[in-house]
Amino acid sequence: MTDETWQRPAPEPSSFTGPFWEATRERRLVLQFCTVAKKFQHYPRPVSIYTGRKTIEWHEVSGSGRIYAVTATHRGPPAFRGQEPYIVATIELDEGVRLMSNVIDCKPSDARIGARVRLAWSPTAGGFNFPTFVLCP
């Protein structure tokens, strides 16, 4: 996806995803961190996946990582029509957690498993930003 005039639909933050989405307004990527296990988790949850307790804090992460899995979507849902093909990837961040996002500003054939990526941002309606990724040179 490279169309600068297209805007993603706005997210609908919940009580436990709110800090994630609020940080995107400042283009900061924050993830939950279990203070007991000393590990990150994503997607946001009300408790630690490691302890089952509310031993979580929000920590900013680098946004650097590599493509763990990737596919090109040639027919998207209605909100994404006209943006095809676009790249959907699982990104493994250097902090050890994986998240699903898009790799932007490249051809689908250039987005390969193992390729290094860095954080980029795509605006959404409502003033939030969606974390996307670009290939590292």
Image (cartoon, helix red, strand yellow):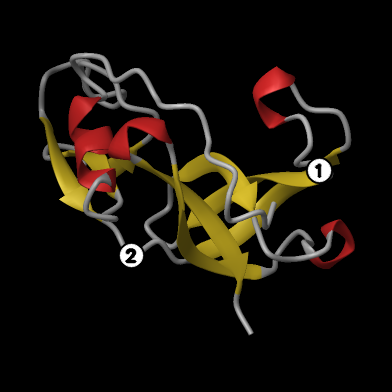
Classify residue 62 by image quadrant: bottom left
Asked if residue 123 is positioned above or below residue 65 in the image, the reply reads above
Residue 106 image label: none
For badge 1, the amino acid type reads: Thr
Asked if residue 116 is positioned above or below residue 12 in the image, the reply reads below
Asked if residue 96 is positioned above or below residue 54 in the image, the reply reads below
Q: Neighbour class for label 2 at 10 Å: few (<14), some, many (≥20)?
A: few
Q: Residue at x 11, y 40 (%)?
A: 35
Which of 8 and 69 lies nearest the eye of the viewer? 8
Q: Residue at x 65, y 24 (%)?
A: 79
The residue labelled by disc 2 is 62
The residue labelled by disc 1 is 71
For badge 2, the amino acid type reads: Ser
Where is residue 58? Give x, y as percent. 15, 41
Which of 58 and 87 lies nearest the eye of the viewer? 87
Which badge, 1 or 2, is on the more N-terminal residue? Answer: 2
Q: Neighbour class for label 1 at 10 Å: few (<14), some, many (≥20)?
A: some
Where is residue 45? Give x, y as percent. 28, 20
In the picture as drawn, the residue positioned furthest to the front comes out as 5
